Amino acid sequence: MDLFQAACQGIGLALAAGLFCGAVAAASQDERGSPGPLLVVLIAIAVLGGAFMFGASLASADHPAWPGWVVGAPIALFSFGIARAVVSGAAERAGEQGSAGTIVGIAALGALIIAALSLLWGPLGLVALGAIVFLAFGRRRHEQHKHAGLRSLR
């Protein structure tokens, strides 16, 4: 496996680590939306797991692992934040009609699918990264326009 394939595979695995832990972190929030006690532990697991898996992907292709540690940690942290925001928002909108556990399960399954597809064909990790970045910009754009028409006329 060449460096490009190994790096793409590492990107996909780091994304999957962050997405999985972010989904679980969204489930650990209480009714008011404040973070549960597991938040710091889940962030650490996501960052260390993403760094380790990216490094292992590079090392399996006979490249040094340390660049994977440096790149994998921020990718996992970024995907953690996006997954936590998306899953907690979806669970909040579902309210009583839906189950937060089902939403978390779907997000966790998506993370496992990204990991499996990245192991089968590395460049799919770049596609997943592009999708996560697109989702992040879409959420940001939506938040900016959310209250645009609400002004006081006093």
Image (cartoon, rainbow, N blue to C red):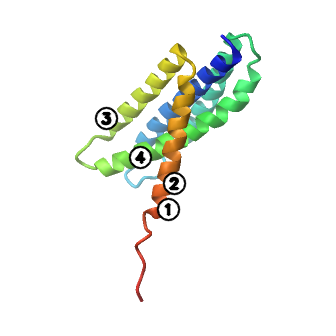
The image shows residue 105 at horizontal and vertical percentages of: 36, 31
Taking depth in this image into account, of 42 and 62 the one nearest to the observer is 62
Which comes before the other along the chain, label 1 or label 3?
3
Q: Which residue in the rendered view is the most extreme toward the left?
A: 97
Q: Residues within 10 Å of mark 4 (few under 14, many from 20)?
A: many
Disc on res. 88: 4
Identify the secondary structure beneath mark 1.
helix
Q: Residue at x 42, y 89 (%)?
A: 154
The image shows residue 136 at horizontal and vertical percentages of: 52, 46
Q: Distance between the residues labelled 2 and 3?
A: 25 Å
- Check disc 4 and give the amino acid type: Ser
Q: Decide: marks 2, 1 in contact (CB < 8 A)?
A: yes
Disc on res. 144: 1
Q: How crowded is mark 1: few (under 14 residues within 10 Å), some or many (20 or more)?
A: few
Q: Decide: marks 2, 4 in contact (CB < 8 A)?
A: no
Q: Residue at x 65, y 37 (%)?
A: 74
- Read off the residue under disc 2: 140
The image shows residue 86 at horizontal and vertical percentages of: 43, 45
